Image: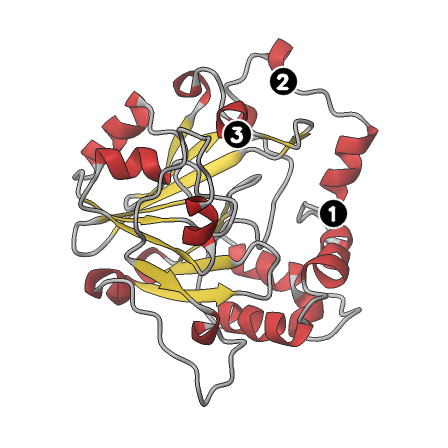
Amino acid sequence: MSSKLIPSKPDDVMVIRDITPNVVTFSVPFLRHGQFPIGGRGTAVRLTSGGLAIFSPVALTPSAQAKITSLGGDVRYLIATDFEHHIFLSEWAAAYPNAKLVGPEGLPEKRAKVHNDPKIGHEPFAVVITRDQSSSAPEATRKPIHIGEDFDADFEVEYLPTHPNKELVFFYRPDRVLVQADLMFNLPAVEQYSRVPEAEKPRMGVLQRFFNSFQNTEGEALGMKRFLWHVVSRGDREGFEKSVKRIAGWDFETVVPCHGETIVGGGKGVFEKVFSWHLVGKGASK
């Protein structure tokens, strides 16, 4: 049940942060498999039109709802950024019934199979992004991604069906912010656990430290490079690289991950370092 993944009092531990005047993050504690403290993060972006897009929504607490109201309250898009970050879509859709639901192919069917979880409803998706819209698809048959006129005016979108979680990555051009879910972690999850009482914070044992070693961007990020090469991209490395190269061509400076620390400033360089084996060749030093 998804309720087991949610803090008992999410408003008490949520960190709401203005990344830019138009980009706000909602960070919460989260234990992967009940033992790895990777945290969770939702992101709200105010479009040039004034409407709001919500990515990877987390619990809609009173504080989160008040922040959305302060941004104008006009929620137009609710976006599941991959197969994992969709649990709170129903909660937000109930509060903002005019919002379009957006997600990757297969997610509506995955949710439709769930009948014993009150958190996960069967709301229809207005936009489902498919493999033939990815940079990994043949150029001759590739189709453009259209989410909404005002959304398309502000965002570049890349779909990675080659990623195990079916990742959607978004570049908000006005503020040069990259919003993504599981394509790139940046552990440890300091901010996401910053409001958790010290006595309740998870203990970092050998297993947790080992996990963090291939999910952080410090130094040469060799652990993450190996993980991306040998695990994440192994199913279709050529297709994965096409998507990563397109993302690397965007002019972003901030990277917002769902797990770990937000990289404010210098995010493009960190991205290029982490994905260097896919951008310039395995074993490259950058």
Q: Classify 6 as above or below 110.
A: above
Q: Classify 141 as above or below 285.
A: below
Q: Specify the quadrant of the image occupied by residue 69.
A: top left
Q: Position of residue 6 (x, y in %)?
A: 49, 25
Indicate the amino acid at tag 3.
Gln
Q: Position of residue 161 (x, y in %)?
A: 54, 65
Q: Position of residue 53 (x, y in %)?
A: 29, 49
Name the residue at the bottom extreme.
Answer: 140
Q: Classify 239 as above or below 70.
A: below
Q: Specify the quadrant of the image occupied by residue 282.
A: bottom right
Indicate the amino acid at tag 1.
Phe
Q: Classify 38 as above or below 271.
A: above
Tell me which numbered mark, 2 or 1, is placed earlier along the sequence. Answer: 2
Q: Secondary structure at mark 3?
A: helix
Tell me which numbered mark, 2 or 3, is placed earlier along the sequence. Answer: 3
Tell me which numbered mark, 3 or 1, is placed earlier along the sequence. Answer: 3
Q: Specify the quadrant of the image occupied by residue 205.
A: top right
Task: Give the left or right position of residue 204, taking residue 93 as reference.
Answer: right
Q: Are marks 3 and 1 in contact (CB under 8 Å)?
A: no
Q: Are marks 2 and 1 in contact (CB under 8 Å)?
A: no
Q: Which residue is mark 3?
A: 192
Q: Report, in whole angstroms, how far the alpha carbon at label 2 lies from the one at label 3.
A: 11 Å
**Residue at image coords 56%, 40%:** 259
Indicate the amino acid at tag 2.
Lys
Q: Which residue is mark 2?
A: 201
- Using the image, tell me which numbered label, if any, was put on residue 214: 1
Does residue 220 show up? no
